Image (cartoon, helix red, strand yellow):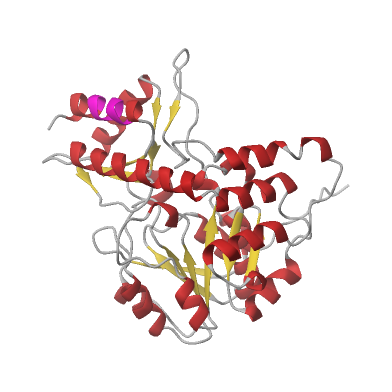
Amino acid sequence: MTSKRPTPQPGILDIAPYVPGRSAAAPGVTPIKLSSNESPLGASPRAIAAFRSVADHLEVYPEGTSKVLRVALAQVHGIDVERIVCGNGSDDLLHLLAQCYLGEGDEAVMSQYGFSVYPIVTMAAGARIIMAPEAEYRSDVDALLAAVTPRTKMVFLANPNNPTGTYLSAAEVARLHAGLRGDILLVIDSAYAEYVTAADYSVGIDLVDSADNVVMVRTFSKMGLAAARIGWMYGPEHLVDVINRIRGPFNVNLAGQLAAAEATRDTPFNDKLRQHNAQWRDWLTTELASNRLQVLPSQANFVLVLFPSEAEANAAFDALMAKGLIVRQVGAAYGIPNGLRISIGSEAAMRGVVDILKTTVGR
């Protein structure tokens, strides 16, 4: 009898799975997780209360369009409620966008050190990845435009970028968009928008409102709701219509919808989170920058530290792990073997990181 089994679509087995940051420290050591860019202050108390309120109603299906959340987002951000789509994290929405607008023979352009999910969703749709080189670990508009071919159907731009923390100004993003054909979809991934303090930054709403080929994708994972898995996007009506045709009918759970709606409206907590992050992000950058360490200027809730060599980065990682400070190695996932990405945490965690790295690497 011949043994047979289902065969995946071509190219699926060529995809390298996403590898999350580590969460376990050495045995007997209390872990302090600085590897996944989670909120250093936890979640909004209002969001926590809303999440708990669902416990007595777990038998009920969530509202299919996440209306309570879309209304909150529309009111706070001043945008059209009908042009918002919510998802099971922003990854869910990135997959849907690729599924709808990429196919066999198409190409998607992205930056050299862009978010590692972009290649996954591109290859899963049967399309080809085109990597544009970066300049000093920063997305390069000219390189992105030069990478466009007649087969290009999508351009991914993480702004600020993960894992580098660098960003493009509103003027540069507008220049990128102006150089694209109208049939190319520009996906602006603003996952870290809540932490940006740069005056010349734009989250992308203005471009979405003025163009038919731009979508902005956001997440609640970095502002305290990573466990709930909530993402959202804002796009033109025709694109929203397409995504809603294949989106799962109950793709956002009820607890997540209510928690995210309250997190959206809790502006005092969000301001506190931004202020804490800015203070310790800038402090960490100043303390670590030296002749031996390069700290990339970040607008996110992490910093990327570049060591003189891969061996020294690994030694620093091990020294931090031994004390329970878990950071992110970015060699395998992003091709920066001499880099460690460090999420902004508590004051004690930040001081601990600096003390260990100064001892391990020196000044």
- Position of 288 with respect to 159 (left or right) is left
Residue at left 56%, top 53%?
264
Camera-side residue of 146 and 8: 146
Residue at left 82%, top 40%?
58
Residue 171 magenta: no
Is 161 located above or below residue 289 in the figure? below
Report if residue 200 is visible in the image: yes
How many marks overall?
0
Q: Where is residue 100 in the image (x, y as percent from the top left)?
A: 65, 72
Q: Quadrant of the C terminus?
A: top left
Q: Where is residue 213 in the image (x, y as percent from the top left)?
A: 53, 80
Camera-side residue of 291 and 172: 172
Q: Tell me the magenta residue range.
A: 350-356
- Position of 95 with respect to 191 (left or right) is right
Residue 355 magenta: yes
Is 182 located above or below residue 233 in the figure? below
Report if residue 152 is visible in the image: no
Q: Quadrant of residue 354?
A: top left
Q: Where is residue 148 in the image (x, y as percent from the top left)?
A: 41, 79
Q: Residue furthest top?
A: 28
Residue at left 37%, top 78%?
174
Camera-side residue of 106 and 341: 341
Magenta stretch mostly in which secondary structure? helix
- Position of 234 with respect to 32 (left or right) is right
Q: Position of residue 84 (x, y in %)?
A: 63, 67
